[in-house]
Image: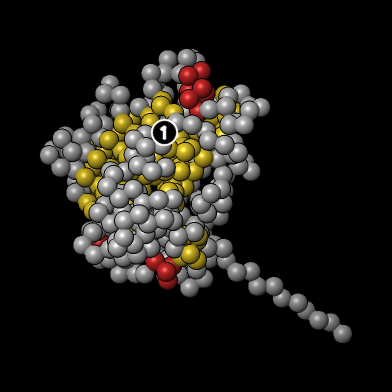
Amino acid sequence: MATIKTVKPLGGGDFSSLQAWEDWADDQVSSAQWAECYSGGDLGLVTLGGWTTYPVAPDIPRIYAAPGHQHTGVRGTGAYISIPASSAGITSYIPVEIIGIRMFFEYEAIFGIFLGSDYVNALSGVLIDKCLFETVVDFYSNFSSGIYLLGDAPGITGCTIRNCLFYPELVDLAPPEGLCSIQYPIYVDARLWGIVTGLVVDNNTIGGYASFGYGMWFRAIQGGTITATIRNNICMPSVPMADYNLFVSALTTYTFTNNMSSDATAGVYGGTGNLINKTASDQFVNTTSDLSLKATSEAINSGVTVATFSNDAIHTSGWRPQRGIWDMGALEKAATRVSSQIMIG
């Protein structure tokens, strides 16, 4: 059974920062240590590594937003980490589950979540679920990734990224490219004989990324290997960018189905059910502040069923599907309930 400790930035919990929790947790004999995170202030940067017992399923550490302190699918809500320049929000060299945390990128932040092996053990069993990534200003010249997986040997195996939301910035400092954001929202890097196997990327919504970056980049070159399943993702900026692909793949082996893009890249990797050349404003309630689906969105009922989960970014298990067929993206559109009345007499 996991040991649960509360992390409350305003005080009154077991710890006031995630790093303070990690410093305690890494000395425990059991690796089944959970950090229940509360809103109200910055949870602080954290690096996980060097634990007394290297985590192996089912005893994997978890960092998650407490009930009532989760984001609501829009920016500015829920338990969060504020990431300053040249920093990463969560860095982990051990398996970890990260659920429902909001990552706020300050100017020239580098990574929301950075994952890599400790060069002794393969990183196995990672889950990133229901997280939200946002920034206010466009850090035009900087390399940045929302989620970055570094597959240096012995590599990463069995990692799942699902139900995550990536918002564009609100203030554009480098026109005329239009609102953009993080350069590479999801970046899987297996160059130089890196190894990433069993990767699953499902039902993420990328509503913005830097005009000189890629929405999802799977990079297996120079002897690297990536095997992945990529399903039900929506990948498009709020302002279409010419000459920059939304999905970029150099995968060794992959399944690529039921994804949507605003260019043609969702359709160039084979698979079925992919939708291409779509417009963000036709899909989202608001392209900069609310990435939930419009009632007329083409992403509704366009996904494929995934047997391993049924939650979305803000609802618990059992939410998907709402109409018998899954939606694409992180937020499953609620079905319209039609009530009827019977008049007698």
Q: Secondary structure at mark 1?
A: strand
Q: Nearer the viewer, residue 262 or 232?
A: 262
Note whether 62 is above or below 205 in the view shown.
above
Q: Is residue 324 visible to the viewer in this orientation of the structure? A: no
Note whether 92 is above or below 256 in the view shown.
above
Q: Nearer the viewer, residue 3 or 10?
A: 10
Residue drawn at x 50%, y 28% as measured from the top left:
18
The C terminus appears in which quarter of the rendering? bottom right
The type of residue carrying mark 1 is Ile
Q: How many marks?
A: 1
List x then y, in percent, for residue 184: 30, 48
Q: Nearer the viewer, residue 29 or 144?
A: 144
Q: Is residue 281 visible to the viewer in this orientation of the structure? A: yes
Q: Nearer the viewer, residue 283 or 198?
A: 283
The image quarter containing residue 242 is bottom left
The N terminus appears in which quarter of the rendering? top right
List x then y, in percent, for residue 66: 60, 38
List x then y, in percent, for residue 87: 37, 34
The residue that label 1 is drawn on is 90
Residue drawn at x 60%, y 69% as measured from the top left:
336
Relative to residue 6, is residue 265 drawn left or right?
Answer: left
List x then y, in percent, for residue 213: 26, 52
Residue drawn at x 59%, y 39% as measured from the top left:
39
Local packing at callout 1 (Cα closer than 10 Å; few below 14, some 14-19, many 20+) is many
The image quarter containing residue 145 is top left
Note whether 318 is above or below 281 in the view shown.
above
Residue drawn at x 84%, y 82% as measured from the top left:
344
Note whether 176 is above or below 201 in the view shown.
below
